[in-house]
Amino acid sequence: MARLNLNPNPTFNAKVEICQPGGEPVAVEFTFKHRTRDEMDDFIKTLTDLSIEDQVMSVASGWELVEPFNVENVKRLAQNYITAPAAIRDKYIAELIKAKEKN
C-alpha cells in the first residue's frame, strides 16, 4: 500500500545552491512552506508585485545559517549574493512542482 499522506506536512526542507563571487556555490538548507495547487497559482500571479525579500519570506520560514531568518537578514543576503533570492524562489517552485526529474 502506498504511503502517501493526502495532508502533506506544512513545511519541507531543501538545499539551495547559493553562488559566491570568486568561489564555489554553497548549499544552504531552507525550510519551505507547503502550498496547495490553488495557493501556488495565486502565489505565482503575485510574484511580480513582491519585492525580492518578500518573495523569500513568503516561500521560506527558516534556514540553516547562523544568523536568524528574518527580513533584515534576507535583505543582507540579497545585497551580498545577488542571485540568491532567485535561486531560493526557483528551488521552492521546482520542489513543489518537481519540474526536474531526479535520477
Image (spheres, helix red, strand yellow):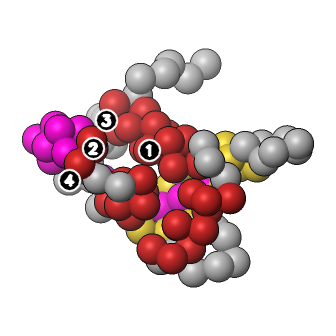
Horizontally, residue 24 falls left or right of residue 49, namely right
The Cα–Cα distance between marks 1 and 2, rounded to whole angstroms, is 10 Å
**Numbered range of the magenta stretch:** 29-46
Residue depicted at x 68% and y 59%: 80
Q: Earlier in the sequence, mark 2 or mark 3?
A: 3
Q: Is residue 16 within the magenta segment?
A: no
Q: Position of residue 59 (x, y in %)?
A: 36, 55
The Cα–Cα distance between marks 2 and 3, rounded to whole angstroms, is 35 Å
Marks 1,2: beta carbons within 8 A: yes
Amino acid bearing label 2: Leu
Q: Position of residue 43 (x, y in %)?
A: 21, 46
Residue beneath disc 4: 7
Residue depicted at x 51% and y 76%: 72
Horizontally, residue 71 falls left or right of residue 24, namely left
The circle drawn on residue 47 is 2
**Helix or strand or loop: what does disc 1 sit on?**
helix
